[in-house]
Amino acid sequence: MNKFKKITTTTIIYAIVLLFVAISVYPVLRIFTISLRPGDNLLNRSLAIVPADATFDNYVRLFTEKPFLLWIRNSLMVSITVTIVGVAFASLAGYAFSRYRFPGRKAGLLSLLITQMFPATMLLLPLFIMLSKLGLINSFLGLIIMYSATALPFCIWLMKGYYDTIPFSLEESAMVDGAGRFYTFWKIILPLAAPALVITALFSFMAAWNEYIVAAQVLWYEEMFTIPLGLKSLQGNMTTEWGMYAAGSLLISVPVVALFLFLSRWLVSGLTLGSVKG
Amino acid sequence: MRKTLALTLLFLFVTAQILVSIDKVHLWHTMEPNKRPLLKDVVDEFMRDNPDIEVILLSKNVEELRTGYQAAAAFTGGGPELVYGPMDQIGPFEVMKLKNSDRSIIMPLEEVFPEEFFKKFTANGLIHYKGHLYQIADRIGNHLALPYNKRLFDEAGLPGPPETIEQLIEYGQKLTKDVDGDGVIDQWGLVWNYTEPFWYVPFFGGYGGRVFDENNKPQLDSPAAAKAFKLIKDMRDVYKIMPPECDYDIADNMFNQGNAGMIINGDWSWQKYMGSPEVDFGLAKIPYVEESGLWCSPMVSATGYSINSNTKPEVMEATKKVLTWLTSETVQKRFATEFKSIPSIKTLYNDPEFANDPTVKTSAAQIEAGQLMPIIPEMRAAWDAMRPALQSVVGGNMTPEEGATYQQKLCIEKINDMYEVAGAGSSQHITKYIIYIIGIALGLYLTYLLIFKFVLALLRNPYTMEARNARFAILISIPAAIVMFGVVIYPFFYNIVLSFSNMNMTNVNSWEVIGVEQYGKVLWDFDMSFADYRNSIGSEGGFVTWDYLKYFITHHKFVAVFIKTLIWTIVNVFFHVTLGVMLALLMNRKLPGKPIFRVLLILPWAVPQYIVALTWRGMFISDTGAINLMLNHLGIAGVNWLSEPTMAFIAAIITNIWLGFSFMMVIALGGLQSIPKELYEAAKIDGASSWKQFWNVTVPLLKPVMVPAITLGTVWTFNNLNVLWLVTNGGQPADHSHILVTYVYRAAFNLYRYGYAAAFSVLIFLFLAFFGLTFMNRSQVAEKA
């Protein structure tokens, strides 16, 4: 009887998981179909995943006719820097907010949230004016600062939330052993927060990787284009090179998936707190 | 010796570089992707002949070029030396003035070039506005015409393209058929983007209508308007020659794949059709209207180059040279031959190689029948007024006559909104000073807080353990604080100040603070008067309060959209969180194949939103979209997802749920790792059911991680412009599918109502701040430490 119940549960779980996997994958497969079609057709009445006249031409053209590798390089440079900044700054600030009481703590935490509440489209014009006054137009530095500021509020809150779940007793015993504040943070707490660091890294990376609107304002030279800008340049007012656009969209998801695969061992790591908690 | 030589060479090389200074000329343009390679070719050729000039190209679409150029030229005194685009951008450019000057952001070209220079151009290639020459066109056109597929015409035994509306309908019916015999029509007579006003104007013109009269007053309620509306609706519903749902991409793909006999589309698209294996391309004029004795008359506009008023004197010569080359006969001829475009050089009209081409001939004849695109900025208001009226009529929510009245009324309203400089009266001055005083008081209070609650608090008892801890904490949060403070503070206060100002397109560099008038406009704005409302529901006397309440909810513009925004946000976040947590729990179990599932489940987060939103839009199309086809398989009747207001909104919500659940799943997955397994074991021993374990162990321990994610997720969803905009194609149908951010984007940004838009967004901000702080306080995550 128990065995029967177990089998039913597993079947139901599999059914749910497979259903959602299908829902996740299907639209992406549609994009894949568009990328295989010759002749820039976004829509088609056929439901076949691989069209009859399928070709990898769009992928080839992306690399031969467009500076796709250059775009990738630019995007990687920006996104990786933003990831490093995001993870470093957020893991530090989140720790301060989680563990210490200091003047301005609550105000700081809440104002981080508040920065997210102004509709971003409204901030574009003043941001552009500010960047151009600071001479940061046409510089990756300007972009990196912008993207870091987009990513940090969420990352700090997430890190703080995660640190909150780590028991205080760990630090107390370390401090009793004579370890300094930074040492305790670095050696004891940070490794335990690996899953949150993974999310912070992914989120910061994504904040930079797929961003288009700010980049379009800031970058005026095609050789500085990031991938989203490069893809956008396949579009005109009325006409779009849909085949290449779809191909590019899929290709730029690959690094994100790879990053997730690489990081997921820490996201669901064996370093659970249970084993350290005395 | 060798070293000296090398040094000398290096020195010479460096000086040579300095002496031959290179002039950089930036050109922002709106050319379609298929024209860009040729543009690049001719520019490269130019740079070979002029090694001291470097031309830097940047392509943008029309909207982005306009706003981007205005931001750069009017607000920062910079921008590219040359801008290329359709002539109707001249109006919005002319009206914007430079800082401390009454010069427009584009230069009057008669001051730059000698009179001789202009002689070679046709009259419609020189764009004058308010007495100045602001643009030199390199081509005339951008007009719609009627491409048709000769192969399908032959199959149907039709002699040639239709010349009258009656023929259009007759031929259309012969071409509309079910080719494979499955009971579904798969070849249509006519496809076109019939819910966009640019495509409606030719028919409006065919019945004798013009958007503006000689004094630039809109006349959208002329009898022609209703006739054109009726014709469009009848072609679909009575004569059934076009598909029930059709936008630009649907029409374009159908024609290009040989599934439609005729399409109404612009000169930018013809080259693609000529290259399509499914299309035997022919071009015809949009037909003749017998009733009025006029040909249908599409908008015709020139496209050309203007010079930025901020161009530095030292690159002026180079800029002129580039402009001269790009509008020259050589270059125009190359574009004309390759793209069949109509040039602006007189002599080219006599060039036999070009003038005898059938496509060019028809295109030129169509231009002849067309109407010139008005340059005045009011045209933007007219487009925004025609669009909802057209969509309401086509959607069956208004009669053609009502649509005509409605678009006229809307157009006048929008023109007023656009030009009205708020705060002209003197009574405003009092509120203005009150605002100054409140501003100063707030500033002082913040300084007080900073000094007494922060700095002094830190300096008090500096040697205690507590003080050391505080210093350490502040030290490690400083990097993040600097980034956030540096980026956020200026835009934030800029917007607050703007919300109390009267800034619009006429005064970007001379606006003033006027008080709370813009807030008043947002908070007291109804789309019909209360008296009209009562008449429309036929209520006289009775419960005034109840009527008023209903009126307020349904006709107050802000409240009506606000309610929709709440529904949008709540439904989205609910599904994001429940699906995310559910999947995270499943992914946290022992499950063979889990790593693969996990990766596949994050795909919605990984793929760029833009293409995904458009793909979903494609899946929602009523007769060819995957979703209706699947519903049909299950025996459920399909739904008109994109043309019915509620359905369009639901379609956008479904898309957004798909886009967001992965993110919540990843967060929850991370959060689950911090829950010690012992707690579950202990709960099991106590005999707690799985549900109880979830509710008493999982939920409380997930909270610290999930609450910030939910709060921010809510805020992001509330302010999410892209998804709804893309799936509903800018609020379609008839501007019914809006949430606050898309509404303000449409209502304010398109018409340059900066002050109003800022006030609107401050109100959004205040609401979210109130919600966010309450939620965080109630869930206690900020306190806990």
Image: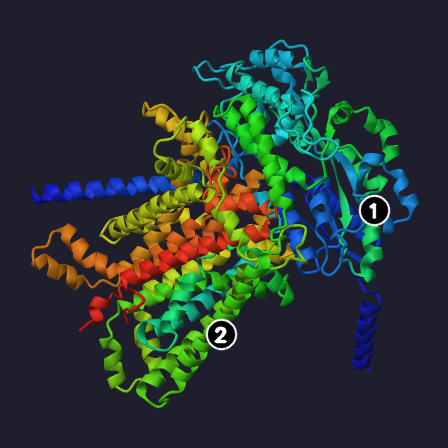
Left or right: residue B72 versus residue B483 is right
| Residue B602 drawn at (x, y percent) | 37, 49
Q: Where is residue B61 drawn, in percent x and y?
A: 63, 44
Where disc 1 sits, the SS reads helix
Q: Mark 2 or 1 closer to N-term? A: 1
Mark 2: amino acid:
Leu
Residue under label 1: B325
Q: Nearer the viewer, residue B116 or B261?
A: B116
Give residue A109's position: percent from left, percent from top.
Answer: 38, 68
Determine which residue is flagged by label 2. Answer: B444
The picture places residue B349, in percent across and down from the top left corner, at 85, 30
Chain of the residue under the numbered disc 1 shown in the image: B
Which chain is indicated by disc 2?
B
Query: Secondary structure beneath disc 2?
Result: helix
Instruction: Please report the residue visible at 68 percent of the width from the left and 50 percent of the height from the top.
Output: B506
Q: Is B496 placed above or below B386 here?
A: below
Q: Is residue B508 visible?
A: yes
- Mark 2 or mark 1: which is in front? 2
Work out whether disc 2 and disc 1 sit on a shared chain: yes
Amino acid type indicated by mark 1: Trp
Q: Residues within 10 Å of mark 1 (few under 14, many from 20)?
A: some
Image quarter in which the N terminus of chain B is found: bottom right
Relative height, residue A174 to residue A212 (above, below)? below
| Crowd tier of the residue under label 2, counting other residues whose Cα lies within 10 Å: few below 14, some 14–19, many 20 or above | few
Residue at far front of view: B541
Figure quadrant of the C terminus of chain B? bottom left
Residue B23 figure quarter: bottom right
Rendered view: B732 above or below B179: below
The span from disc 2 to disc 1 (Cα, nearest Å) is 59 Å
